[in-house]
Amino acid sequence: MRVSAVLAAFAGWAPWAGSRAAQVEYARGNPRLPFSPAVRVGDVLYLSGQIGFDASDRLPEGIEAQGRQAMENIAAVLKTQGASMRDVFKCTVMMADMRQWADFNTVYTAFFEPDRLPARSAFGSSGLVGGALLEIECWAYAPRRR
């Protein structure tokens, strides 16, 4: 099969293609930052990575405190979009030190129901913004409430 045929088939499937075009909506965020905290494409919210900065732009000490704050930041972004942690179906976790995986998991799992854990990927990073110990991005299924 030719590449053009594969691309055409994919374009016909994509939720933003053709007559089923979904409007892309960008959430307003901090005007000093070069990204949106969330982007909605159809019924899916794509959240930018969240770091454990608190309201004063400080990072708490330790993986558990930063993980908790990052998860609370995710919940806050979701709330602005009419969604909750219950709507999250995929997370990606970037960690400065993968040896802290178990410590982070104790915090992470507290934010989800045991039978509704999102799919998740994780990888180690050689550096994160501001010296953070982790960054978490999520996807959520959040159909518009009519």
Image (cartoon, helix red, strand yellow):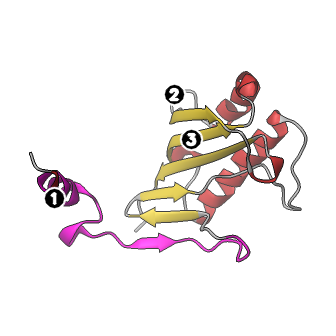
Secondary structure, mark 3, is strand
Is 29 in the magenta?
Answer: yes
Query: Quadrant of the image for the N terminus?
Result: top left
Q: Which quadrant would residue 145 be assigned to in this image?
A: bottom left
| Distance of label 2 from label 3 (alpha carbons) | 19 Å
Secondary structure, mark 2, is loop
From the viewer's perspective, tell me whether residue 102 is left or right of residue 114.
right
- Which residue sits at x=61%, y=36%? 112
Q: Residues within 10 Å of mark 1 (few under 14, many from 20)?
A: few
Q: Which residue is mark 2?
A: 115
Query: Mark number for residue 8?
Result: 1
- Which residue sits at x=89%, y=45%? 60
Name the residue type under label 2: Asp
Q: Nearer the viewer, mark 2 or mark 3?
A: 3
Query: Mark number for residue 92?
Result: 3
Q: Nearer the viewer, mark 2 or mark 1?
A: 1
Q: Which quadrant would residue 23 be assigned to in this image?
A: bottom left
Q: Residues within 10 Å of mark 3 (few under 14, many from 20)?
A: some
Q: Earlier in the sequence, mark 3 or mark 1?
A: 1
Residue 109 versus residue 29 in the image, above or below: above
- Which residue sits at x=50%, y=47%? 87
Whole-percent x, y for residue 17 in the image? 24, 66
Q: Nearer the viewer, mark 3 or mark 1?
A: 1
Whole-percent x, y for residue 122 in the image? 59, 33
Q: Which residues are magenta?
A: 4-33
Whole-percent x, y for residue 37 in the image? 62, 63
Q: Earlier in the sequence, mark 2 or mark 3?
A: 3
Name the residue type under label 1: Ala
| Distance of label 3 from label 1 (alpha carbons) | 29 Å
